[in-house]
Amino acid sequence: MRNTVDRNEGSISEKHLDYAGAKMGMWIFLFTEILFFGGLFLLYSVYRVKYLADFHSSASELDIVLGTANTIILLTSSMFMALSISSLRKGRKGRSILFQLITIGLGVFFLVNKYFEWSAHIHQGIYPDSPVLLDMARGRIIFFSLYYVMTGLHGLHVLIGVAIIAVMAAFTQRETVSPLDFVKLENTGLYWHFVDIVWIYLFPLFYLIT
């Protein structure tokens, strides 16, 4: 009887350590992502101070309606991601999968909007190393270069997040992710919220400085 209790306690302790380790690993990864995007934000800030007028005039050419729509889309997707985790922890597997699929749909919607926005600029001849862009003032060249790099990297993170959530939905269906073992889904939620936060900074820096 004593041995059985010891084994159970060891199993619980091991499970706890696995959960703590997984969470710690995710936070370390997110910290490296913060450093990466933080460097880009710092670069943006330096050039904005140097070319303030060019940055303001360039920002006026961005589609604030699509930018606002994408902000609402990502905020809503984060809500559904949180609801999916909460539902799973309460044992509501079907509802959790539904909320994950909604999050995926909203992520794809965001990318579609970004595709149309980029397409409009490219149609105008404004894209990296284009003749139209290179004929502009230096500050405008830097603004649009940073715009494509930073929103492009963010879009890549959104795409990766959509793929990971799709995997989590499949894991939830197979019960690889379950109410007793939900750390993978929880870490995915942390990643998705990070993607959301990055956009919350990108939106005012590029769209609201006119």
Image (cartoon, rainbow, N blue to C red):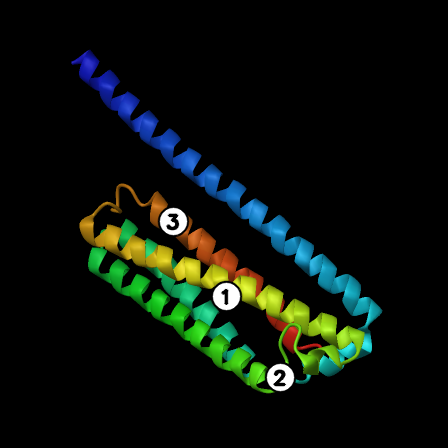
Q: Against 114, is 196 above or below? A: above
Question: What quarter of the picture does the C terminus occupy?
Answer: bottom right
Residue that appears at 56% across and 86% down:
123
- Residue at the disc numbered 1: 155
Mark 3 or mark 1: name the one nearer the start of the chain: 1
- Residue at the disc numbered 2: 125
Hey, what amino acid is under mark 2? Gly
Of circles 3 and 2, the one toward us is 2
Question: What quarter of the picture does the N terminus occupy?
Answer: top left
Q: Which mark is residue 186?
A: 3
Q: Against 155, is 29 above or below? A: above
Residue 4 in picture, x, y percent from top left: 18, 17
Mark 2 or mark 1: name the one nearer the start of the chain: 2
6 or 36: nearer the eye?
36
71 or 138: nearer the eye?
138
Q: Residues within 10 Å of mark 1 (few under 14, many from 20)?
A: many
Residue 42 in picture, x, y percent from top left: 72, 58
Of circles 2 and 1, the one toward us is 2
Residue 187 in picture, x, y percent from top left: 41, 48
81 or 66: nearer the eye?
66
User: CA gap, disc 3 to disc 1?
Assistant: 21 Å
User: CA gap, disc 3 to disc 2?
Assistant: 42 Å
Hey, what amino acid is under mark 3? Glu
Q: How many marks?
A: 3
Hey, what amino acid is under mark 1? Gly
